[in-house]
Amino acid sequence: MTTHAPHAPQARDSSQGPRSDPRAGNAAQSVTLPASLDEAVAALAAMPAAVPVAGGTDLMAAVNAGLLRPAALVGLGRINEIRGWQYQDGHALLGAGLTHARMGRPDFAALIPALAAAARAAGPPQIRNAGTLGGNIATAAPTGDALPVLAALEAVLVIVGPGGSRREIPVSHLLAGREMLRPGELIGFVRVPLLHAPQVFLKATGRTGPGRATASVGLVLDPARRGVRCAIGAVAPMPLRPLEAEQWVASLIDWDGDRSLAPEALEAFGDYVAAACVPDQGEPVAPAVLHLRRTVAVLARRALGRALSS
């Protein structure tokens, strides 16, 4: 499975699995369609060069363009156990096969509003109908819409491996490339805390309508811990958490009252986040950097304002 590293590919792909060797051939030699996660893991163990694929929204484009030549494919589309979700000790256990279209529906939006908003913003209908949560995480493209939300929610991945093994890693570890998936492993589920508190996803694109983010933000209020969690996407190879800005603004919020915040504090929070996530790259500061910093500041300020007024 592809993990997030500074050299990670920029295209978003609804597949799970490593990029195969381009010398493997011009097309997949075989396609396996397991009916369970255990069968999928067994297939991958038997064919180490195989690439798991769910929605394949970018994987097949890469194949068609000659950029990827997998020796075999293991299709995950028939595995029902990863296409829904269940409740587990104050968390939602989300199947990695959940499509963006499914996460965008009202019943899911009532559960995890920011993730539903990110799913609805993921692209045109054909992309939302095919692309999956697990694929968004596995490809770990900087512009992946779900990633800043999952980082802000401090989600945990449930990794399925050979012999029925299960292990858990924070989503932030995988995105940062700190812990690689082992051979034969797949993202089976994503465990997300049900906060029952305001959460917001916003993104800016370079055009009107659905498009790849130039910057995005996932922001979550956590009244139980009197905290603000914010993650900025698309401006770096991985979502960025401006921890000092989070702690500073959380200390100003009246958690026992109406959670109000002075306009100048909101403005300062946006600037604080932007300075942390889009640092200077020399003097004079390039106009593109200044524009991106202003964009991030506006998104962070608006996201916090909406969360506080919810």
Image (tube, rainbow, N blue to C red):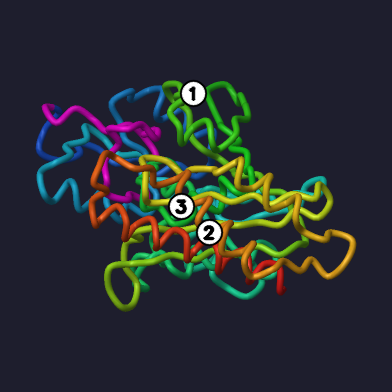
Label 2 with label 3: CB-CB less than 8 Å:
yes
Three-letter amino acid code of the residue under disc 2: Gly
Label of residue 179 in the image: 1
Q: Give the Cα separation between the discs numbered 2 and 3.
A: 6 Å
Of badges 1 and 3, nearer the viewer stands 3
For mark 1, give the secondary structure: loop
Quadrant position of residue 85: bottom right
Q: What secondary structure do most residues of the magenta stretch adopt?
A: loop
Q: Residues within 10 Å of mark 3 (few under 14, many from 20)?
A: many
Can you tell which mark lies on residue 274? 3
- Quadrant holding the C terminus: bottom right
The three-letter amino acid code for the residue at tag 1 is: Glu
Q: Is residue 114 left or right of residue 213?
A: right
Write the start and end of the magenta stretch as one range. 1-23
204 or 27, nearer to the observer = 204
Q: Position of residue 295 (x, y in %)?
A: 40, 63
**Mark 2 highlights which residue?**
270
Please determine whether, in this image, residue 31 is positioned above or below residue 100.
above
Residue 117: in sight, yes or no?
yes
